Amino acid sequence: MAEPQIDVRPGTAADIDELAELAALTFPLAAPPHVTAESLATFIDQHLSASRLQDYLADPARQLTVATSPTGRLIGYTLLVFAQPQDPDVAAIVQFESAVEVSKVYAHPAEHGSGVARALIDDAIAGASERGATGMWLGVNQENVRAQRFYAKCGFARVGTKRFQVGAGLEHDFVYALDLSDVAVESI
C-alpha cells in the first residue's frame, strides 16, 4: 500500500475560511457525548471561528499548520502555543524550561487512520525542537480513549489532569507531555 500524499505546511490567510469549516467539523468529534450542542457552538464561535483563527495566524507565539490532500483540500491542522502553561493545574505538572502546548491537532474524519494526524504531530515535534523548546504538552478529554492511544503512540505520557471549559460545561482532561530531549528529531 502506497504512503498517502500529505502536504504539511504553515497555514496562511487563504486557508482561514476552509480551516474554520474543518475546525467546526472536527472539534465536536473529540468532545464527550454529554457536551451539549449549545456548548459546542459557543466554544467553536469563541475559539475556532474564522476571525479567531486569523488572530492565531497573526500571533508570533502561535504556529498554525495545515495538512492538505494532493488536491489541495485541507484535511487536518495543528495549533501550537509557544509559551509556558498559564493554567495553574498544568503549570504545576509541566515544568519544561521552554514548553510548547499542542493546543489543537485534528484530522478530517474521512482521514482518521490515514497518517494525517501523525504527519502533523511529527511536524509539530520537529518545529518545536527547531524553535528551542524542551518539551511539549497537551490536554485530551478523559473520555477520548482513541486520542489518548494516539498520543501515547507518538511518545507522549500522561502526567496529570486539568479542567477545560466548553461553553457552559466544565470538562476534565488528562495532561500528556513529551520531553523533547528524549526525541530523536532526525528520525521523525
Image (cartoon, rainbow, N blue to C red):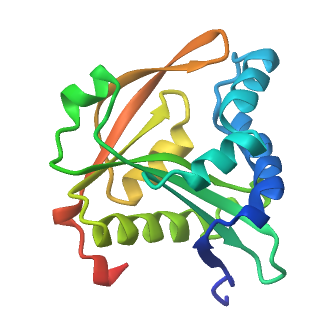
- Which of the 4 image quadrants contains residue 12? bottom right
Apparent side of residue 119 relative to residue 162 in the rendered image (left or right): right
- The residue depicted at 23 percent of the width and 61 percent of the height is 180
| Residue 55 visible in the shown view | yes
Q: Which one is in front, 133 or 109? A: 133
- The residue depicted at 65 percent of the width and 30 percent of the height is 31
- The residue depicted at 71 percent of the width and 38 percent of the height is 29
- Which of the 4 image quadrants contains residue 161? top left
In the image, residue 133 above or below residue 127: above
Q: Which one is in front, 50 or 118? A: 50
Apparent side of residue 139 relative to residue 109 in the rendered image (left or right): left
Q: Classify the position of the C terminus by image quarter.
A: bottom left
Residue lying at the far bottom of the rendered structure: 2
In the image, residue 146 above or below residue 67: above
Residue lying at the far top of the rendered structure: 168
Apparent side of residue 23 relative to residue 99 in the rendered image (left or right): right
- The residue depicted at 68 percent of the width and 40 percent of the height is 52
Residue 176 image offset from top left, x and y in percent: 34, 41
Residue 128 image offset from top left, x and y in percent: 34, 63
Residue 11 image offset from top left, x and y in percent: 64, 65
Residue 109 image offset from top left, x and y in percent: 76, 53
| Residue 111 visible in the shown view | no
Q: Classify the position of the N terminus by image quarter.
A: bottom right
In the image, residue 61 above or below residue 4: above
| Total numbered labels | 0
